[in-house]
Image (cartoon, helix red, strand yellow):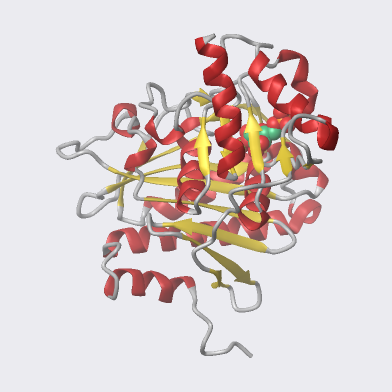
């Protein structure tokens, strides 16, 4: 039996609007629509091979990545849910070349939504956690037909950010700029229930997350930092560090939000034309907002992620985020190397 003291996402959002005045009705409804879409994606993920959603879709996205069926399905679920939501002026996605204006909005929607519909695509077929990441921006004043330019706002302008992890349970993590809160999907009731408030990432950690197979392509300050962690107790750091790498950013960030750690996807000299693998607008920015709201830090190794002025919707950036003292240390190594 559900307890009456349980706080649903709907109740939480109403209290944020009515009692705290943090959000308006449109933003509340927009978050509700995104959460409902995440529930549908969670159901599709949960069906696995029985749902016919595993495997490749046989198409490529704008970034030349092969799309999985679930990338396409999740994108369609989010598009369909928001098309008639009425609170949006436009949305943009990892899986679409250009922004998609909302044709049926009435009156004009105030917000822009940008998302990675399915994060961790390489894990879909092997039954490992995947997720959805989203960011909400304001549509600039006077823009009636938002194009790419309308979206190119620094992460500091985000009014909300969140992600869902489709793991052993489905969890929605949300910030409205006033702390970070988690909601667990009660699969029987079909509602997200508040299960964590004002999460805080410990400032120190003994755990790092990185794809070590790229080590030969890293810049010297990056190698220096990881070499020191690997040297353990007898090295300059004087203690041992452990490593974890799920290869789904949502799952790696969720672990860090839960128990601390540093997540790194550095610049990689394998392809010098690419400044990093992860995308600024729908991976780095929303995660950076969440991490900072939880007392952590997020940089490119050189500058704060949230301060970047984007020049492209699908722009890539290096990402260092999590426990603030570790992010500080590796960022200092990059700055030192740059000024040497
Ligand atoms: O395969 P790699 O190099 O370990 O990269 C893993 C990273 O790529 C991503 O899967 C990229 O996200 P998409 O699946 O949305 O393209 C991140 O979630 C993850 O951190
Ligand atoms: Mg992703
Ligand atoms: Mg994706």
- Number of marks in the image? 0
Q: Position of residue 294 (x, y in %)?
A: 50, 54
Do we see residue 30 in this rendering? yes
Which residue is found at the position 75% from the left and 42% from the top?
Answer: 246
Q: Position of residue 272 (x, y in %)?
A: 60, 9
Side (left or right) of 285 relative to 16 = right
In front of the other: 242 or 44: 242
From what the image shows, is residue 194 above or below residue 234?
Answer: below
Side (left or right) of 106 relative to 303 = left
Which residue is found at the position 52% from the left and 27% from the top?
Answer: 300
Residue furthest toward the right? 234
In front of the other: 11 or 86: 11
- The quarter of the picture where residue 277 lies is top right
Location of the N terminus (image quadrant) = bottom right
Residue furthest toward the left? 142
Do we see residue 72 in this rendering? no
Location of the C terminus (image quadrant) = top right
- The quarter of the picture where residue 229 lies is top right
In front of the other: 299 or 164: 299
From what the image shows, is residue 303 above or below residue 2?
Answer: above
Side (left or right) of 187 relative to 302 = right
In front of the other: 103 or 228: 228
From what the image shows, is residue 126 above or below residue 327?
Answer: below
Which residue is found at the position 26% from the left and 62% from the top?
Answer: 24
Q: Position of residue 139 (x, y in %)?
A: 26, 41
Q: Position of residue 324 (x, y in %)?
A: 55, 43
């Amino acid at each position: 039996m559900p307890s009456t003291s349980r706080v649903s996402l709907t109740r939480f959002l109403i209290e944020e609007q009515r009692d705290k005045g943090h959000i308006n009705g449109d933003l509340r409804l927009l978050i509700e629509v995104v959460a409902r879409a995440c529930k549908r994606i969670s159901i599709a993920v949960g069906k696995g091979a029985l749902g016919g959603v595993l495997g490749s879709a046989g198409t490529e996205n704008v970034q030349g990545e092969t799309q999985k069926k679930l990338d396409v399905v999740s994108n369609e679920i989010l598009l369909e849910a928001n098309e008639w939501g009425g609170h949006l002026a436009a949305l943009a996605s990892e899986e679409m070349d250009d922004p998609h204006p909302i044709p049926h909005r009435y009156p004009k929607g105030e917000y822009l939504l940008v998302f990675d519909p399915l994060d961790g695509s390489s894990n879909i077929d092997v039954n490992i956690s995947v997720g959805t990441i989203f960011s909400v921006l304001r549509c600039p004043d006077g823009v009636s037909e938002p194009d790419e330019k309308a979206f190119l706002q620094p992460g500091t302008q985000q009014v909300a950010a969140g992600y869902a992890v489709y793991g052993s349970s489905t969890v929605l993590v949300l910030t409205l700029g006033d702390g970070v809160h988690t909601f667990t999907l009660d699969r029987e009731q079909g509602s997200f229930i508040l299960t964590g408030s004002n999460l805080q990432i410990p400032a120190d950690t003994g755990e790092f997350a990185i794809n070590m197979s790229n080590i030969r392509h890293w810049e010297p300050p990056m190698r220096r930092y990881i070499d020191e962690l690997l040297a353990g107790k007898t090295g300059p750091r004087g203690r041992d560090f452990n490593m974890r790498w799920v290869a789904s950013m949502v799952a790696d960030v969720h672990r860090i939000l839960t128990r601390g750690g540093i997540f790194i996807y550095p610049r990689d000299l394998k392809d010098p034309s690419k400044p990093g693998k992860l995308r600024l607008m729908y991976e780095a920015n929303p995660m950076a907002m969440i991490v900072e709201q939880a007392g952590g830090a997020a940089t490119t190794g050189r500058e704060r992620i949230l301060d970047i002025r984007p020049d492209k919707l699908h722009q890539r950036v290096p990402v260092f985020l999590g426990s603030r003292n570790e992010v500080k240390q590796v960022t200092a190594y990059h700055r030192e190397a740059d000024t040497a």
